């Protein structure tokens, strides 16, 4: 099933803020593009289902929290978090 992916204004703000602060902006851009591409295809099967009914998908360095509405084939990205890379010894 194909889905239309939309982001909340809050998620758009978070992604812009993450990108502006990122040491590797290309990595953030690539992860975001890949996640959105995946969500367009299989949103109802991706990520981890949370107790609140939302789903969370991790593709380093980003965590997308989203809601799937199968009846209207729509995905709404509600928030985006940045995962700090592990410290190197």
Image: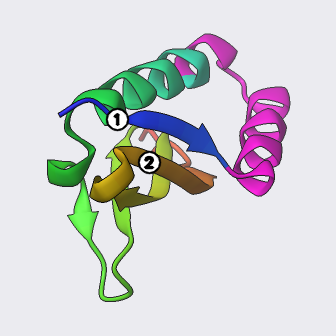
- Mark 2 lies on a secondary structure that is strand
Q: Residues within 10 Å of mark 2 (few under 14, many from 20)?
A: many
Horizontal arrangement in the rendering, residue 78 relative to residue 63 (left or right): right
Q: Is residue 50 above or below residue 16?
A: below
Give the left or right position of residue 26, taking residue 14 as reference. left
Label placed on residue 3: 1
Magenta span includes 14: yes
Spot occupied by residue 69 in the image (x, y as percentages of width and height): 37, 59
Q: Which residues are magenta?
A: 8-27
Question: Can you identify the residue that label 2 sits on?
Answer: 75
Main SS, magenta region, reads helix
Q: At x 75% / y 29%, what residue is drawn?
A: 19
Mark 1: few/some/many CA within 10 Å (<14, 14-19, 20+): many
User: What is the secondary structure assignment of the residue under circle 1?
Assistant: loop
Residue drawn at x 74%, y 39% as measured from the top left = 18
Indicate the position of residue 33 as horizontal and vertical percent values: 49, 19
Q: Is residue 43 magenta?
A: no
Q: Please, is residue 18 above or below residue 8 in the view? A: above
Camera-side residue of 44 and 20: 44
Q: At x 80% / y 50%, what residue is drawn?
A: 9
Q: CB of mark 1 within 8 Å of CB of mark 2?
A: yes
Q: Is residue 56 left or right of residue 47?
A: right
Q: CA distance from mark 1 to mark 2?
A: 6 Å
Q: Residue at x 61, y 11 (%)?
A: 26
Residue 79 percent across, percent down from the top left: 62, 58
60 or 56: which is nearer to us?
56
Looking at the image, the residue that sits furthest to the front is 71
């Amino acid at each position: 099933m194909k889905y239309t992916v939309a982001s909340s204004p809050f998620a758009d703000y978070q992604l812009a803020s993450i990108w502006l602060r990122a040491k590797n902006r290309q990595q953030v851009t690539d992860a975001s593009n890949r996640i959105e591409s995946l969500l367009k295809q299989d949103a109802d099967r991706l990520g981890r289902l949370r107790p609140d009914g939302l789903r969370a998908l991790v593709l380093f360095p980003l965590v997308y929290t989203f809601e799937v509405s199968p009846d209207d084939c729509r995905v709404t990205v509600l928030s985006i978090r940045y995962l700090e890379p592990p410290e190197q010894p």
